[in-house]
C-alpha cells in the first residue's frame, strides 16, 4: 500500500470516527466537565481531567464507529449519510469492528487507573454506547437513551473523584437526558423524511407537529433541574448568570427551528455547544470566586 492509499485510508478512519466533526465530542464533554467541577469542588486533579477528556474523545469516536456499523445498510439511503465510509465501502465492516474495539480498549486502559466503582461503571458506559444505535429500531424516543449514554460520564466523574455517587449526580444526568432530547430532536428534524421512509424511529417523528414545543419544553426542564442543582449547592450569581446565558441561547433555538428549515435545524443543533460552554463557565467562575 503506497502513501496515497494510506492517506486515503486514514482520512476514511477519521471521518468514520467523526473527528472532522467535533460537536459530538463537545456535547459529550460538557456534562462530564460539569460533574468533574462539582465533584471536586472546582479543583479537579489535572490527571483525572486529562483522562476524562481523552476518554470522551475515544468513546465518542468508538460510538460513531459502532453507530455506522449498525446503520451501514441504512446510511446509503439517507441523503446526509450516504457518503459515510462504511456506506461507500471505503472502510470494511471488519476494519470498523477492529477500530471500535481498539478505541474501547484504550479507553478501558485509562479507566483502570481509577477505583473499582469507576471501572464497574465503565462497563455500563460501554453497553450504552454499543446498544444505542439499535434503539432507533424499537424505542419511540431513542434520543432519551442517547442522553443517558452521553451523560454517563457524570456518575463516572463523581465515582472517580469521590468513590461514590451522590443523588445530585443523577439529577445532573436527568438534566442531560432532557438536553440530549432537545438537541438531538433538532438534529432528527433534518432527517425526518428519510427516517420515515426507512422505518427508523426518532423523537422528531414521535413529537410530530409538536416537535418545536417539545424541544423548548426539554430545554426548560433541563435548565430547571440545573437551577435546582445550583440552589442545592448554594451557588451564587455567577452560576445563575451562566444559566441565564444558556436560557437566552435556548430561546434563540426557537427562532432557528420554528419554521423547521433543515439548514437552521442543523445550525440549532450545532449551537448547543455554546449552551454547554456558558453553563460550564458560570460553574467554573463560581468556584474560582469561592476560592
Image (cartoon, grey):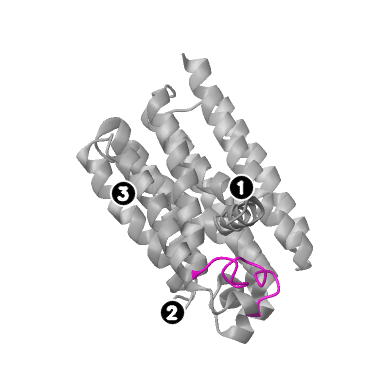
* 274 sits to left or right of 135: right
Q: Where residue 44 appears, x then y in whole percent? A: 41, 25
Q: Where residue 174 appears, x then y in whole percent? A: 43, 53
Sort mark 3 into few (<14), some (14-19) or many (20+) by Cα contacts within 10 Å.
Answer: some
Q: How much space separates mark 2 and mark 1, taking CA atoms? A: 28 Å
The reply to whether residue 35 is in sight is no
Residue farthest to the left, as pictured? 116
Task: Give the camera-side residue of 192 and 131.
Answer: 131
Dot 2 or dot 3: first in sequence order is 3
> Which of the two marks, 2 or 3, is nearer to us in this view?
3
Say if mark 3 contacts mark 1, CB within 8 Å. Answer: no
Query: What secondary structure is found at the residue carrying circle 1?
Result: loop
Query: What secondary structure is found at the residue carrying circle 3?
Result: helix
> Which of the two marks, 2 or 1, is nearer to us in this view?
1
Q: Quadrant of residue 129?
A: bottom left
Q: Where residue 7 appears, x then y in whole percent? A: 63, 51
Residue at (44, 28) in percent of width and height: 234
Task: Give the camera-side residue of 219 and 20.
Answer: 20
| 119 drawn magenta | no
Dot 3 or dot 1: first in sequence order is 1
Residue at (66, 38) in percent of width and height: 245
Dot 3 corresponds to which residue? 122
* Magenta highlight range: 77-92
As drawn, the label of residue 138 is 2
Dot 1 corresponds to which residue? 22
Residue at (27, 42) in percent of width and height: 118
The reply to whether residue 247 is in sight is yes
Looking at the rendering, in which quadrant would you find the N terminus? Answer: bottom right
* 250 sits to left or right of 289: right
Q: How much space separates mark 3 and mark 1, taking CA atoms? A: 22 Å
As drawn, the label of residue 249 is none
Q: Where residue 13 appears, x then y in whole percent? A: 56, 56
Amino acid at each position: 500500500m503506497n502513501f496515497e492509499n494510506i492517506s486515503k485510508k486514514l482520512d476514511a478512519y477519521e471521518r468514520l470516527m467523526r473527528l472532522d466533526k467535533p460537536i459530538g465530542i463537545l456535547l459529550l464533554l460538557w456534562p462530564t466537565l460539569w460533574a468533574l467541577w462539582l465533584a471536586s469542588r472546582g479543583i479537579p486533579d489535572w490527571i483525572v481531567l486529562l483522562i476524562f477528556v481523552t476518554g470522551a474523545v475515544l468513546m465518542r469516536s468508538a460510538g460513531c464507529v459502532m453507530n455506522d456499523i449498525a446503520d451501514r445498510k441504512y446510511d446509503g439511503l439517507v441523503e446526509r449519510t450516504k457518503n459515510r465510509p462504511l456506506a461507500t465501502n471505503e472502510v470494511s465492516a471488519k476494519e470498523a469492528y477492529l477500530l471500535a474495539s481498539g478505541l474501547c480498549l484504550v479507553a478501558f486502559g485509562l479507566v483502570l487507573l481509577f477505583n473499582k466503582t469507576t471501572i464497574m461503571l465503565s462497563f455500563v458506559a460501554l453497553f450504552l454506547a454499543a446498544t444505542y444505535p439499535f434503539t432507533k429500531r424499537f424505542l419511540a424516543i431513542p434520543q432519551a437513551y442517547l442522553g443517558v449514554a452521553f451523560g454517563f460520564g457524570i456518575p463516572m466523574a463523581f465515582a472517580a473523584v469521590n468513590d461514590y455517587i451522590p443523588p445530585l449526580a443523577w439529577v445532573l444526568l436527568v438534566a442531560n437526558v432532557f438536553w440530549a432530547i432537545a438537541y438531538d430532536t433538532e438534529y432528527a428534524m433534518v432527517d425526518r423524511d428519510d427516517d420515515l421512509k426507512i422505518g427508523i424511529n426518532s423523537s422528531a417523528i414521535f413529537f410530530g407537529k409538536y416537535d418545536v414545543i417539545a424541544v423548548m419544553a426539554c430545554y426548560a426542564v433541563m435548565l430547571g433541574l440545573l437551577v435546582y442543582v445550583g440552589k442545592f449547592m448554594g451557588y451564587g450569581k455567577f452560576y445563575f448568570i451562566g444559566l441565564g446565558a444558556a436560557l437566552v441561547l435556548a430561546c434563540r433555538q426557537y427562532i432557528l427551528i420554528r419554521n423547521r428549515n433543515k439548514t437552521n435545524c442543523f445550525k440549532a443543533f450545532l449551537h448547543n455547544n455554546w449552551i454547554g460552554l456558558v453553563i460550564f463557565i458560570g460553574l467554573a467562575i463560581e468556584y474560582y470566586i469561592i476560592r
